[in-house]
Amino acid sequence: MKVAVFGGGYAGVSLVRQLEDALPSNVELLLVDDSGHHLVQHELHRAVRRPSVADDIRVPLTDVVERARVRRGRVTDIDPEANEATLSDGSTVGYDIGAVCLGAETEFYGLPGVEEHATPLKRLPHAERIREDFMATLTDGGRAVVGGAGLSGIQLAGELSALAREADGADVTVTLLEQMDEVAPSFPSAFRRAVRDELTARDVEVRTGTAVASANEDAVELVSGESVPYDTLAWTGGIRGPDALGGDRPQVDGRLRLGGSTFVLGDAARVVDADGEAVPASAQSAIREARSVAENVRRLVADDDGVFAPRLDQFAFDSPGWLVSVGDGAVAQIGPSIVTGKAAIALKASVGAGYLSSVGAVRNAVDLVNDELGLAAE
């Protein structure tokens, strides 16, 4: 029997590591990924200000997995009825049980000029380009505009503002645009308010209720008719599904099944959990979904010769809280309590390090904590 996991992000890596322990040794376990590395996406914004962080948050997949086989390849199509994936080189990967963990791509919503002129923040080369653009902005003076105030946009705006302060860029403005009325609009109200306060305290110009209509090489045009000039433009305004799913994020229930014996989890899916609640796209969600899918895959493998299909668990999302970096600060919500300052910074560092340790990258975890807390590396 072959179990194939497509994508080496949070969902894919978490799922593979659990399946390595849960499945019998005679089950072939395959991880297919286009880059061959696992990227700690929620720390990617750090690489804009601290390029050396790239070495801490990029881990070879062969160092992450144990008995699973890693295959390099870009998935271009998934056929859940045929239990088959097609790769960009024309080859196919058949499987008995599959899991689509391909993450999401940046959504530009067809806004004229935005995709052409704005840089997303999904890969390390994106962080490098944003840094290069912003360093030129620091030299000449001007404005950086970040479109979209979800967690990625919040963290990126915070990093740019901190970089401006470090470079004594008093003439540089960092503006965060959000079409909804609040930053972090899909999160609890107390968290939203604390995040906005932190952004303002760190010299980020926050403009909510501000919808983008288009962009050109000099300015972002708003639906209101206002023109917002920029020298650096980044876009974190939304996500779409992976190309292998036609750009869609299929909606799935708590069993996380795309069809037959194919599952879909992480940002690649729009998940409605067992309680009927929409699950936010986040690293936390992807990791928790992987636990549920791992158990269901184990049941399917164990019952391979059975007459009746096993009953599958329903995933229920119950978050202990939320956490976001804002430059040299952070905001956390744990239960009803909001935490900021040094406690939130330490919590952010420990969460990042804990995750890296969980995937076997202990040295990377130590270096990340050193960087987050400003400690000297050993």
Image (cartoon, helix red, strand yellow):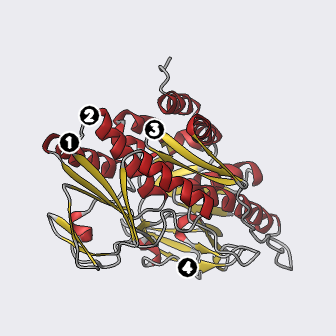
Of mark 2 and mark 3, the one earlier in the sequence is 2
CA separation, marks 3 and 1? Answer: 19 Å
Circle 3 crowding by C-alpha within 10 Å: few under 14, some 14–19, many from 20: some
Of mark 3 and mark 1, the one earlier in the sequence is 1
Residue receiving disc 2: 167
Circle 4 crowding by C-alpha within 10 Å: few under 14, some 14–19, many from 20: some
Of mark 1 and mark 2, the one earlier in the sequence is 1
Residue receiving disc 4: 250
Outermost residue toward the top in this view: 378
- Write down the quadrant of residue 327 in the picture: top left
Of mark 3 and mark 4, the one earlier in the sequence is 4
- Write down the quadrant of residue 97 in the picture: bottom right
Q: Helix, strand or loop at disc 3?
A: loop
Vertical comparison of 121 with 148: above or below = above
CA separation, marks 1 and 4? Answer: 42 Å
- Write down the quadrant of residue 220 in the picture: bottom left
Amino acid residing under circle 3: Asp
Amino acid residing under circle 4: Pro
CA separation, marks 1 and 2? Answer: 8 Å
Between residues 5 and 317, which one lies in front from this camera angle? 317
Q: Helix, strand or loop at disc 1?
A: helix
Q: Do the residues labelled 3 and 1 touch (CB within 8 Å)?
A: no
Left or right, 248 with respect to 361, comes to left
**Residue 33 appears in view:** no
Picture quarter with the N terminus = bottom right
Q: Are marks 1 and 2 in contact (CB under 8 Å)?
A: yes
CA separation, marks 3 and 4? Answer: 37 Å
